Each structure stands twice: as structure tokens, then as C-alpha cells.
Amino acid sequence: MRKNTSQTIRRAQRLPVILIGEGLLVGAAAGIVVMLYRIALTYAGQWMNAALDWMRGDMLRTALWFAALLVMALIVSRLVKWEPMISGSGIPQVEGEILGKLTQKWKKVLPAKFCGGFLCLLGGLSLGREGPSIQLGAMSGQGISRLLDRGKTEERHLMTCGASAGLAAAFHAPLAGMMFALEEIHKGFSVSILVSVMTSSVTADYICSHIMGLDPVFQFRLEHVLPQNYYWMLLVLGVILGVLGALYNKVMLLAQDLYRKPKFLNETGRLIIAFMAAGVMGILMPSVLGSGGDLIVDLTGGELLLGAAALTFVVKFLFSAVSFGSGAPGGIFFPLLVLGALIGGIFAMACVELFGLDPVYINNFVLLAMAGYFTAIVRAPITGIILLFEMSGTVSQMLSLAVVSVAAYITATLLKSEPIYESLLERILQGQGGAEKKGAFSGGQKVLSEFVIMGGSALEGRKVMEIDWPKNCLLVAVEREGKEMIPRGKTQLQAGDRLTVMTDERDAGYIHDKMENLCYTSI
């Protein structure tokens, strides 16, 4: 045990330099995997549209397409049963493993998620590519770690690098990938992890954009900056987005509950319902199928009028709940951006009619609403702002993006709506019997974790010997103003101190929760 502990500490001292090279390697691997996934999904969308054109108006061909959808549902259900961790977005699973609460097997997740996500988009389910891309990237990082025989602490850093690379490659958004990985996945900032994640994100984006081009994801331009006399509309829009974001989270979780309520309905039955619903929507309203990128093109091109946009929003919202609630492998990231765009378009068109808003600003509201809706649902405002200006290729809307995002964030928080990925992670843990309990395990690899003491927390101003530290937890170092010191019993902790603690691998989840409670909450 002493040898394991000393090796972990010595390795951690060289980790910032090591992670830069390994982040480059992970970025390359994740970039290639996610690029192939993007290409596969492009073909899936093209083949789905071709199938819909082929079957339209012909009963026999329609029946054959529904039979194909049934086969897809059966294949995806077998994949989910073979590897349950591919179900849903994949982001909660990555977050749970980095926190030490879940375990995934990269050799199974990579092929199963890739194939499952492809089939779901081929079938037309209202799911996105970002969640699977982040999970595929993280599993690429885990695979590199296992092949290089790295320890758990290093492996979690490499998974964070992979998650960042996955989002960067999926959306041609390296800064957003880096910020999302730190803000939502890793839930912490340090120089070592920041530089390595940036390296990984940029590498993946370079590889993917070199093959697939440098064009932003959303191909529409904003000709004018929104005048400040319209900013009161942004506050109203932010409140609306906050309310609808809270509703979105509630409905997505409710959809999962409704699917699981009938005892006779297993994974296969739930997926058959989702794929059959996609078949019906292919006949009645094919525009809501898939992730929905074409809807933004129609909306910003002026082809969707107010009534049509409102109807499309309602149908897309409900179909997204049917698709995601089934447990199909696919994300909610892109569909929620599409829903946000529809909200912004509906709001702007209503303002044109009621308050004389100049129609040239409709596209501004479309972009702003995407960021606000993302913030209300995911509760990662910095990522939302950066993501939208990278995806649209414009930086002129930063102030208005911030106004909408802050208003949506405050509204969703006041409504006591939990961030969607945290709620989904909690459900996964409940399904597995909860996070690891204290004292139940010992041994295994040693894991180093970092925590920052917040002002007013239970640790601020107290001596190390006065604190009731979690069991199976060793305080290794205290970093203050860039200088590291060895903690002693009489060392007095201050706000801003960065604590490095060591624990056994299997106690990491429990220790993480306890340390966050000590560092971030008052006595």
C-alpha cells in the first residue's frame, strides 16, 4: 500500500507535463472516432430521407419501412442489454465514472454506442450526436489509459480530455468542448487539466475539420447587432426559456417514468414504441425526425411562419420525450438547441406582430434562445454562450447572449429545477443501488482528487486537526497562491486553497460527495 501511495504521489508531481502529451494522443484518437461517427450519422440521415421518399404514398413500401424500424429496434435493444451503459445520452455515465461512482468498459461501449446511435438516427428518433460523441471521446481516453497502463487518477484526466475532444469534433467547437468538460464533466479547474483538455480539444477539432471542413454547424448569418432598446425583450425571453427549460427537464424524466411504469414493458418494448412512433411521424410530420438541424435552416430562412413554428415546437418537444425516455442511445443536446431555436423564432415573430420588432432581428432571437434554453436545462451558462458563438461563427452577440442566459439560469434555479444531467446520473445510480458507501471497501488503486475551498464553507478558517475528515481519505497537499505545502495538524485553511486528497478507487464516489459538502457548504 505504501508503494502504491508513494508512486501515485510521485506520478502526480509530473502529471501536468505528462498530460499534455497524452492529451494530444487522446485528442487524435477521439477526433478520429467522433469524425467517423459524424460521417456515419450523415449517411444515416440521407438514407432515412431516401427511405421516406421511397415509401411515401405506397402501402406496401410503408409496411416494409415499419418492418425495418422493428428490426432496428430489436438490434438496438440487444446492444443496450449487452452494454447497459450506452443507454441514453452518455454524458451522465461519463460524469459518474469521473466522480468515481460508475464503471464503464470502453471495449464494449465504443462499438455498442457507435452502432446504436447510428441505428437510432437512421430510424429517425429525435436524438442528438453530442452525448454519444462525448461518451465515445471519453471511452477513447479510457482506452488510451488502459493501453498505456495508467493509474485511475490519470485515467480520469484522460477521460475528461476525451469528453472535451468528443464535443469539439462533434460541433467544430473546441472552446465549448474544453469548457463543457471542465464545467459539467470534471467539475473543477486546474492548470494541469486545463492545458491538457485544451490540447485534446484543439487536436480533435483540427483532425475533424481538416476532413469535414471549417464551416460552422449553423449556416446562417446575423447581419445586425440587436439594439439595446430591445433588451427588455431579452429579459422576458430569458424568463420564458427558464420556465420551458424546467418543463423540459420534468417531461424528460416523466417520460422515463411512464415507460418504466408498466411491468410488462422491458427495454425491447420501450424501443419498439419509440421506433414505431418515428415511423408514424415520418408519415405525418417528417420535419421533426432526427436531430432537427433542417428546422433551424427553415426557421432562419423565413420558411416557418408563426403557427407552423408553434405546432412544430409542440410535436418536436413531445417526440423528443418519446425518443429519449425509451432509453435509446442518443443525446438531448442538439434537439434541445433546436427547441430553443423554435422558442426564439416564435417569440420574435410574436414581438414583430405585437411590439413592432424589426423582422431583421428574428434570427438574433433564434440564436439567443438556443443559448438560454441550453443554460436553463443543463445549467452550464459559460458553455452555452461559447458553444453558440462557435457554432454560428459570430461573436457580435456576446452581451445579449449573456443577458438571456443569466435570466434563464436564474428563472430555472428559482423554479428549483435540477440540471438534467445530474438528475439522469442520480437515476442511474439509484438503478444500480446508489453510490459507493463509506467503509464498505478498501484496497484497489489510489486516486487523487482536487477540491477548492469556497468562502464561507465549513473548512474556511479552521485548522486541519479540527476537521472531521471522511474515513479512508488522506489530505496530501494544500496549494495556496500557486505554492504547494504539506498540511499539518495546525495548518489553517483559507478560502481559495486547493486541497489534494487521496483515497481508494472504490471509495472515490463517497469521498467526492463528502469533500464537496465540506468545501462548498457552510457549517
Image (cartoon, rainbow, N blue to C red):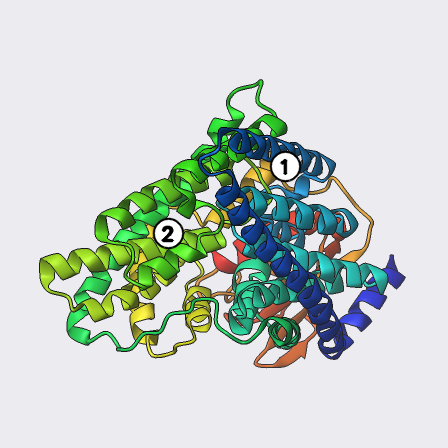
Q: Amino acid at mark 1?
A: Met
- Front residue of 447/429: it is 429
Name the residue beneath numbered marker 2.
339
How packed is label 2: few (under 14 Cα within 10 Å), some, or many (20 or more)? many
How far apart are the alpha carbons under marks 2 and 1? 26 Å
- Residue 98: horizontal and vertical position, in percent? 66, 55
Q: Quadrant of the N terminus?
A: bottom right
Q: Amino acid at mark 2?
A: Leu
Residue 157 location, quadrant:
bottom right
Tell me if 42 is positioned left or right of 216 in this view: right
Position of 33 relative to 112 (above/below): below
Q: How many marks?
A: 2
- Residue 51: horizontal and vertical position, in percent? 54, 43
Q: At 35% from the left edge and 46% from the top edge, which residue is drawn?
A: 246
Name the residue beneath numbered marker 1.
72
For the residues labelled 2 and 1, say whether their Cβ atoms are less than 8 Å apart: no
Q: At 67% from the left edge and 67% from the top edge, which residue is drawn?
A: 31
Q: At 65% from the left edge and 38% from the top edge, which residue is drawn?
A: 76
Position of 73 relative to 246 (above/below): above
- Residue 301: horizontal and vertical position, in percent? 32, 64
